[in-house]
Amino acid sequence: MTIRVLVAEDQAAVRAALVMILRAEPGFEVVGQAADGEEAVRLALELRPDVVLMDVQMPRLDGVSATREVVAAGAGQVLVLTTFDLDEYVYGALRAGASGFLLKDLEADTLVEGIRTVARGDGMLAPSVTKRLIGAFARPERTVGPEARAAVGALTGREREVLACIGSGMSNGEIAARLEMAEATTKTHVSRILAKLRLRSRVQAAILAQDLGLTI
């Protein structure tokens, strides 16, 4: 299956390098390029790519705001790519519904695998980001509101099992193997969980599961 990618990056040289990497990789098609956040949203709505590779710092509309609009419109999964893994960028992007967060100093192979992972519906985080999120989960002051608890309580038993697996960082394939069901069925469960909990990405579902102590 060809993965259709929209590249949103305001620096022309960086954007060209990203496009070159993806065009050289079998199974990828760069369907559009955006030089600012507003153009990224417009093209995402028009082209409906599988993945939007989104820079954080862009003119006219920042990458976090653009991510929020793209995800809310269901116009593709968003993989945020930035130079700095500042908390304001990391948490802002994840709250906006990004499915992944990677740094620009990564190897080409890591970028390609990250896009493939997000296109499958799984989450992808840079190691430094993962460590900080784990540290945040360990803080005792993290709380979950009564509405979120009620929504989780309304999930079916199977959906709660899937949510616990997501909270443990499992991919769809790993969840399918763990719960002995087809991967397509796993994807359906994940989609229903996100809809019922009114979440924009599986990363947000993982954070909620961790907050509730739902892990395998």
Image: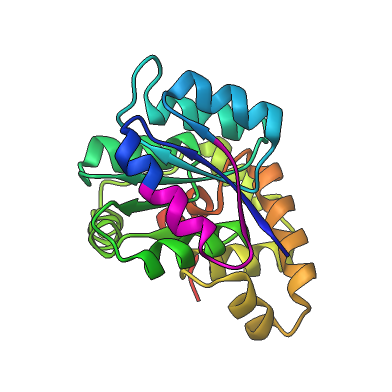
- Name the image quarter holding residue 211: bottom left
Residue at image location 57% in from the left, 36% down from the top: 147
| Residue 154 image offset from top left, x and y in percent | 71, 50
Q: Is residue 126 visible?
A: yes
- Classify 120 as above or below 99: below
Q: Does the segment drawn in magenta span residue 201? A: no
Rendered position, 58 above or below 213: above
Is 25 a magenta residue? yes
Residue closest to the eye, 23 or 36: 23
Q: Quadrant of residue 72?
A: top right
Residue 45 point in image, percent of width and height: 67, 27
Residue 173 position within the rendered picture, expressed as x and y whole percent measured from the top left: 63, 77
From this view, report whether residue 127 is shown above or below residue 53: below
Q: Quadrant of the N terminus?
A: bottom right
Q: Which range of residues does the magenta coloring cover?
A: 17-32
Q: Residue at x 56, y 47 (%)?
A: 201
Q: Residue furthest top?
A: 60
- Name the residue: 29% across, 56% down: 133
